[in-house]
Amino acid sequence: MDHNDFFVGPKTDFAELQANVLLLNIAVDDGSFTPSDDPEHEKQFNSDIDELAQRLRGTWRKINDSGMKLARTEAKSVIEWVQQRLAHSVRTRRKAKKSIFDLPGQQQDPFLPKQQDYMKSFLRKVPEAASEAAPEQTSKQSLSDVKDSDEPHSPNTIVVKFK
């Protein structure tokens, strides 16, 4: 990818660039990774594939295809296609998903367990004795609201008034 054949500039022949990317696609094939017991070897393979995909993504970004030049659009399309194929089918495993809330270099929050315990206690189920008392208060409140109204209502009816 460091060769001039993949350089994008004002004098780039985009049909030739497209052909070179297709040739690269043929050379990579399916990656031909032979399974091994060494996880470091697999990590290195995936890292190399990721680097190649990132370089293709960089080349893709450099192409301005907003004009009416179809060769640029076709080359950009082929580069994206090969980059996506490398990232999703040549790798031995999927990339680990990153949370959109994670910041680069962010460590585990030391207060996270305390916050989780607080939320567990906050969301804990209400004991039955307390839950039985709550409807009585609600029904008394709604009955007092019903008495204030002009229309007759049953005791099971809840009336909501908006001001």
Image: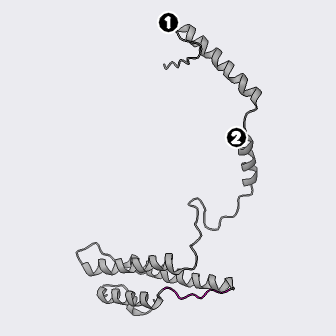
Residue segment shown in magenta: 30-36
* Between 3 and 82, the one nearer to me in the picture: 82
User: On the image, which quarter does residue 96 sit in?
Assistant: bottom right
Question: Which element type, helix, strand or loop, lies under badge 1?
Answer: loop
- Residue tagged 1: 150
- Residue tagged 2: 123
Residue 40 x %, y %: 67, 84
Could you tell me how many numbered marks the image carries? 2
Does the magenta run of residues contain 33? yes
State which tag comes first along the sequence, 2 or 1. Answer: 2
Question: At x 35% / y 77%, what residue is drawn?
Answer: 77
Q: Residue 134: give its label.
A: none
Relative placement, left or right, of 156 versus 39 is: left
Q: In the rendered structure, which amino acid carries the disc numbered 2?
A: Leu
**Within 10 Å of the Cα at label 2, are there few (<14), some (14-19), or many (20+) other Cα atoms?**
few
Residue 22 x %, y %: 38, 87
How far apart are the alpha carbons under marks 2 and 1? 39 Å
- The N terminus sits in image quarter: bottom left
